[in-house]
Amino acid sequence: MTEKTMLKRLKRDHQHIAILLDILTGKHIRLAEGEAVNFNLIRDIVEYMQGYTEHSHHPLEDITYDYYVKKMANIGKPLESNDQLHREHDKITQATSSLMYSLNMILSDVVISREKLISDLVNYTQLQLAHMQFEEKLLFPQFAQHLDEDDWQAIEKICYTKLVDDPLFSDNDNVIFEELREHIARVDKKR
């Protein structure tokens, strides 16, 4: 995998995440307006984010960032200690768990206030969007500038066990998230 392929993968993941966050934004707006929403679809999005993003995408970013920091220190350009990436990934994991808990309660017919669910959805989408902007504006350009082909090959070896096919946006015949995949296809046709 080349440098461009690794960065393309991270950026492509961000594009896919943005599609899902757009759907979640529409859902929390509809909820705020008192309309009915498909809670199973929302849960599928959050489940995808919990499964793929937190267990493949974020580890790839963490490994790349840690490699980058180590490389900069080794070439005499140590970076100011900044653990923002890891802190944000932890915050997102917590927000995902909180939102998933609320959704599972609702789907189990346990009463959760509409305001709590809306708040969880808004917090989650805002956290995710701000996080992606941080990475795309600050981290990805640094990776592109300072990591060479040998670095990317070393990162790929480290990441090998974390690199999995995207269960929603890949071309495989995976039936996981079928309802969500169909919803995204319908939304794309309307655009």
Image (cartoon, rainbow, N blue to C red):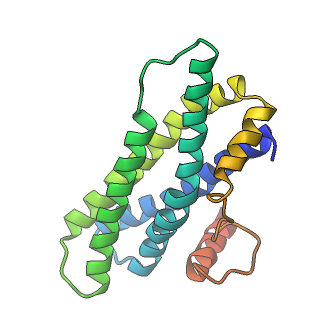
Residue at image coords 27%, 71%? 102
Q: Is residue 126 visible?
A: no
Total count of labels: 0
Quarter in which the C terminus is drawn: bottom right
Residue at image coords 78%, 45%? 5
In this rendering, position of residue 167 left or right of residue 22: right
Q: Position of residue 82 (x, y in %)?
A: 42, 27
Residue at image coords 77%, 38%? 3
In this rendering, position of residue 27 left or right of residue 137: left
In this rendering, position of residue 73 left or right of residue 153: left
Q: Position of residue 8 (x, y in %)?
A: 73, 45
Image quadrant in which you'd find residue 19: bottom right
The answer to whether residue 16 is above or below residue 112 is above
Q: Position of residue 47 (x, y in %)?
A: 46, 71
Residue at image coords 34%, 70%? 100
The answer to whether residue 63 is above or below residue 186 is above
The answer to whether residue 51 is above or below residue 78 is below
Image quadrant in which you'd find residue 152: top right
Q: Is residue 97 visible?
A: yes
In this rendering, position of residue 99 left or right of residue 139: left
